[in-house]
Image (tube, coloured by chain):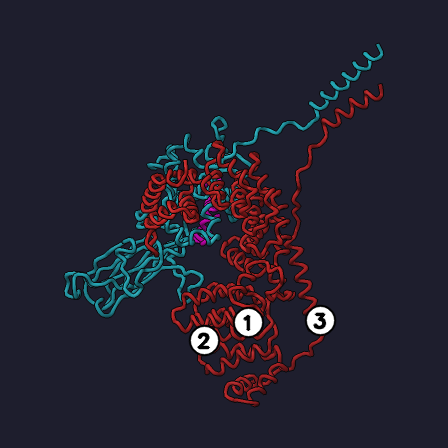
Amino acid sequence: MKFLRGALIACLMALCGWILLAIFAPTEPAAAPQEFTSSNQCRDCHAQVFDEWQSSWHAQAWDDPDVRALSDNFSNTDCIDCHAPRPVFETGIGKRVLPRSSRRSEGVDCIACHALAGGGVAGTIQNPRVACAPVTQVELQRPEFCGVCHDQHKTVQEWKASSYPSQGVGCIDCHMPYRGGDPQAGRDHTCRGGHDMELVRSAVELRARREGHEWVIEIENVGAGHSFPTDERSRAADLFWRPLAGTASAASTSEPWRRAHRIRSPYRYEVGVVDNLLLAHEVREIRLAGEGAGGAIELALFYKLTPYYKDPEHPDPETEAHLIQRLELVP
Amino acid sequence: MRRLFLAGFLGTAWACGPPAEAPVFAHFAALEEGLGAARTRVQAELDGALEATAPAEPLEPGHVAGLVHMLAYSTGRIAELPLEEITTLGDAAVPALAELATRSDHDSGERLAACALLARVATPLACEQLMVLVERAPENWLRSQAAWRLAETDADWLVPRMLLRLKYEKDPETVIWLANALSSLGNFEGLATLWRLEREAPTQELSVRARERLDAIAEGQGIESAQLHWQLWQVDDPEGRVFNSSPSSRLELELWKLIEQLSGAHFQLRGVDDARFQLSRMGAWITPALCASLHDVDVYVRVHSAQCLERMGPRASAAGPALIEALADPSLANQAAAALGRVGYPPAEPALSAALADKAAAHELRVAAAAALGRLGLAASAEVLTATLNRSAEPGDLRQVAATALVRLGLGDRGAACLLEALEDPAADRGAAEETLERWLNGREDQAAQDLFTSWLELAPPPGLIPSSAQDLSRRAARRSLLKAAWSGLGLK
């Protein structure tokens, strides 16, 4: 009997212990937020956005042959930070991104912009009922968000120095517009930029007038919310001219182009190259006179994704660059 | 009864007890402490030097110019007089010498003489002026002259700036003398530049001169050949054959200033790029400072310090234990794993294998650990890498990295099928798969693989041509077909 009583008390004690444990022991952590390890996980629910992103230069940031060549196959590891970044929210807005180790071939992927620090997904609309349960983050729309990479070459600072902030015009207004102009349709994730010649053409205006024996040419940054070109020292814009074919001043129908002006920001090792990017709203005047410029001329502004011509002495912009604006000037 | 009560209580207490503690990787103000200590040491030296130096008397106008003229246009004993006298003037002569050296309208002979006198003064201020000439003088001959003169000084604290200048310098003559000056200050990073110059110099004469300088530097260090000298510099030089003097307090301060440049306080990556470049080329002696920085409170200092160790490669092997500890820091773990692979620290194998095998570990860490195991190339990793590769539930990129690592281990046949599929899979790293398959084929010695390798290379783009994305895709498709057709001939299923 004594033994049974003891056993009963022991059981009671154990039960009390179990109850105490249930009450005071640390509760099971809440289910960990889903870990996103690839942008492909986003595809099923966000097919349109995914397809847009996949056709974007963000998606090709790692694989693009030009990038591979310029970074020496990323043996220049400095490039990895922005070409395969860890989530922006992990390091914080206004701070530099850090490089990731995994799935670098996805480049600047969905996770880089939408993964929150510690799990969860950032979006424009909060919706706990869908699989990724996005949380509204207005920071996604701020230029400083894009700036974590794109301000490495001071693009956001160029924008801040312009009148666009006071007009309430930010990066996404031009580079991620609403699809079809309809806010209900959401924003275009192709993120058009310096590779989109239609957009590049809308950035600048080329004008010219005659003053005495000179052509006075004006290039105006009318549409870029930042310098033209911007962001990459590998970009360049060249103003070329030649006597107009079929006129008295043209020696032949295929006169070589002559450079009148170059707009560029130099690499660090380039001595003697002036940083002369065309600032937002800037109007630059170039005067053209001398042999061949007295008569009718053809004037063209070319845009180049890489700065150098194969033959610097005899550049061939028509095959190596993109035509942005062209004028025929007759005195 | 009491015993039963005690047993019940203890049972409860055991059940409620804290779980086994995970290793903690401490964060502290490593940068602040290192920078502060280095500053204090330099200040103490400056205070000591100040007490030992008599105040300089003001110079008469034209005095320094006279010495410069005398050196430029005299010979023999008379030419030695200004060299002797300038040392008695010390820093007082430096502003005038710097001004004469930089005046573009001035006689070039006297400008060269001013450089020689700056090197003879050799105070920190004079060395600084020589360095400014190397960095900013527009004339190639003046930059190369100033670089040459820096070799006569003991200004090792200029090494980081000289390394950076060497990166961007385009004048071959200046490159040669910068590499020479670095060597005289115990840093042999310029040897790589001299190798390149020897291969790619625009003229035969320059190529020969680069080679002569390489040989002279090796001979000066008592090393049998320039090749061996470079190898010793790249690894940790266990026998201490490469001269590596203990750094001056000023150089230690420069080291901590560079680590400070890694911090989150600086937004522009350009400064971080430069600091990472300089730090990873300063030599094995900086390893302890970078190991301390792995603990800094600033995540950027931690991550970038690990990147510097990674870029230092085998010469940072002393960082192995610190990097293993850093695997416990979630913000640093993947970078620490990558560094362990590059540094080549075999004792890290169990920790890296455990990280890879742990399915609950962060994906980033597992991928970095798999890649690092490949770089270590130890047979002990084969099992965990093969298991990862064969588990279809694992993320595709992790399996691809495991396959790549197996190729590095000489077990490419195991990973080849995965890499073959990755070659045309839009979700995979197709470029990396192509690169690895090429390495695998090249490494196989059987005739079938060698024949296939020849056909594989025939599909490569011509040298110097950057293919388009479409050309990349079609080349990979062709190579995949080639491989598939030869698959069974390679003994693969």
Q: Secondary structure at mark 2?
A: helix
Image quadrant occupied by the C terminus of chain B: top left
Q: Which residue has dot 3 on it? A: B48
Instruction: Tell me where the magenta segment starts and ends, as one range.
Output: A138-158
Per the picture, the main secondary structure of the magenta-coloured stretch is helix
Work out whether residue A75 can be spotted.
yes
- In this image, B346 relative to B15: left or right? left
The N terminus of chain B, quarter of image: top right
Indicate the chain coloured red by its letter: B
Label 3 to label 1: alpha-carbon separation: 37 Å
Where residue B258 appears, as percent x and y from the top left, is 58, 59
The residue labelled by disc 1 is B219
Chain A hue? Answer: cyan
Image-based side of A301 in relation to B14, left or right? left
Numbered disc 3: what chain? B
Q: How many residues crowd around disc 2 within 10 Å: few (fewer than 14), some, or many (20 or more)? A: some
Question: Which residue carries the number 2 mark?
Answer: B141
Q: Is residue B216 magenta?
A: no
Residue farthest to the front, as pictured:
B447
- Identify the residue at horizontal 46%, vertical 32% (top origin): A125
Check if mark 2 and mark 1 are on a common chain: yes
> Which sits earlier in the primary sequence, circle 2 or circle 1?
2
Q: Quadrant of residue A4?
A: top right
